[in-house]
Amino acid sequence: MTTLPLRTTPATLTPDDLGHDLRTAPPGPVEARVRAAVADAGAVLLRGFGVDGTEDFASVVAALGGERLEYSERSTPRKSLGGRVYTSTEYAKDKEIFFHNENSYQASWPRWLFFYCSVPATGGGATPLADIREVTRLLDPDVRAEFAERGWLHVRTYQPGFGLPWPEVFGTEDRAEVDRYCAGAGITATWRPDGVLQTRARRDAFHRHPETGELLWFNHIAFFHPSTLPPPALAVLTDMLGHDNLPNDTRYGDGERIPGSVCAHIRDCYRRASSRFDYERGDVLLVDNMLAAHGREPYDGDRSVAVAMTGLVRRTA
């Protein structure tokens, strides 16, 4: 099994470091130490706190992150575990899930992500992280300038049998309700005569961190670009659907196609800025969603990781 190269790991905190059971609200100095670790590293691994099951995990999330967010405008299959706790993306275990910042294709997104491992994989299965500050620095200046000027466009086509159906994505079977949601979220929705929905959302490629003010690369450009798919899968999809009807596509904000070479460079920047660690049972990973992108390695054996999101951030531009 191939895994990403080992660079650095997220900051790790244990009960010996904090002297507090994180299933209950932490005192000010403990919370400040956790926040400082996340601000510095982009993520912190909370290990050895006896987190055992979804209820314990929900308590940790409530103690450190507050109210949990609903998973809306979905792009990947998940199951609800109750109380706005979800399974991590359910995707073939032999496939990689590429780096992304959660919901960065939307008009709003979660600030904090919490991952909980109840069953570690027997091989692989890490949640690798990419330092977004480093990704932003590594990007070719011409690529940065191009996207800063033109933005990016997310084109999504809801072909039956390919990707999530639109009622699952929007949580309704009412077309008028979908139109209302899209209008409020900066999405253009087009219903074709055959009933297929296609949406287009122009987004900024960079956003400012709400606390530090850093201008950061924050988007799904590489994740949804067709060239990120395995070539055999892309060939089958384009043969069946055509280039303009793929389930997901990314373009420059004016609609012009992004060359595959540009997205290859972007993917390389994520990998060069990447880090990984191996889960242990009971681990909780806290991620600043704007400072660290995450993915998933292929894995062997069973693996069970739950996720929760908190702290809504809204697009300001």
Image (spheres, rainbow, N blue to C red):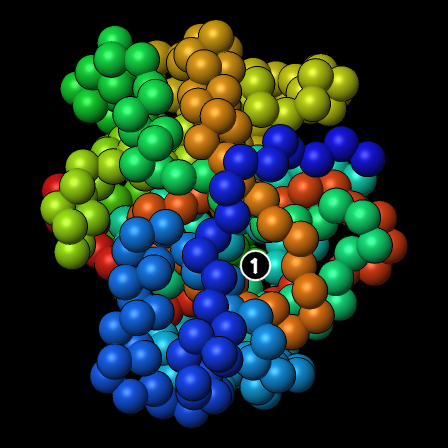
Assess disc 1: are there few (<14), some (14-19) or many (≥20) residues with their C-alpha within 10 Å of its C-alpha. some
Residue at left offset 40%, top offset 46%: 292
Residue 53, position as x, y percentages in the image: 66, 82
Q: Is residue 93 left or right of residue 274?
A: right
Q: Is residue 23 above or below residue 299?
A: below
Q: Say which of 26 and 162 sits in front.
A: 26
Query: Residue 98 is drawn in which quadrant?
Result: top right
Residue 45, position as x, y percentages in the image: 50, 62
Residue at left offset 37%, top offset 50%: 41
Residue named by callout 1: 168
Residue 114 in view here:
no
Residue 141, position as x, y percentages in the image: 24, 13
Residue 4 in view here:
yes
Q: Say which of 192 and 310 sits in front.
A: 310
Q: Quadrant of the C terminus?
A: top left
Q: Could you tell me the amino acid type at mark 1?
A: Glu
